[in-house]
């Protein structure tokens, strides 16, 4: 993931920003729990070595971000 550091940081920040959005029907505790889950996913992804798995993580993050931009909560972080 080191080669894709810029993309990883960008996706991570965008997802955390969207989770802070008042458009999402989450209380403070739920927001903090979701943000902790996102951090854990990205930390586990940082240890990944398989190029195919890394690409899958990017695809999943892009999908989650598109769902968050619609004001919905993706199922994998619900």
Image (spheres, rainbow, N blue to C red):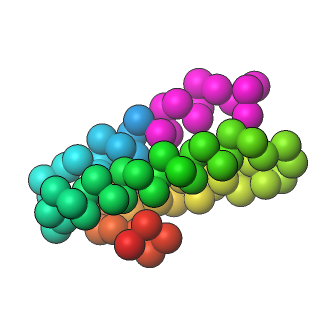
Residue 69: give x, y in percent of width and height: 32, 55
Q: Is residue 73 left or right of residue 64?
A: left
Q: Compared with residue 45, is residue 29 higher up or lower down, i.e. above or below?
A: below
Residue 69 in sight: no
| Residue found at the very far right of the displayed protein | 50
Residue 42 falls in image quadrant: top right
Q: Is residue 11 magenta?
A: yes
Q: Is residue 4 magenta?
A: yes
Which is more toward the observer, 47 or 76? 47
The range drawn in magenta is 1-12
Q: Is residue 53 left or right of residue 69?
A: right
Residue 18: give x, y in percent of width and height: 30, 48
Q: Residue at x 41, y 35 (%)?
A: 13
Q: Quadrant of the C terminus?
A: bottom left
Q: Residue at x 78, y 46 (%)?
A: 48
Q: Residue at x 57, y 53 (%)?
A: 41
Q: Residue at x 33, y 68 (%)?
A: 73
Magenta portion: prevailing SS class: helix
């Amino acid at each position: 993931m080191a080669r894709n550091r810029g993309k990883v940081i960008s996706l991570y920040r965008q997802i955390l920003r969207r989770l802070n959005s008042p458009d999402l029907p989450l209380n403070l505790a739920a927001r903090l729990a979701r943000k902790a889950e996102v951090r854990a996913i990205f930390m586990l992804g940082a240890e990944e070595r398989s190029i195919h798995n890394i690409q899958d993580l990017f695809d999943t993050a892009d999908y989650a971000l598109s769902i968050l931009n619609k004001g919905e909560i993706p199922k994998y972080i619900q």
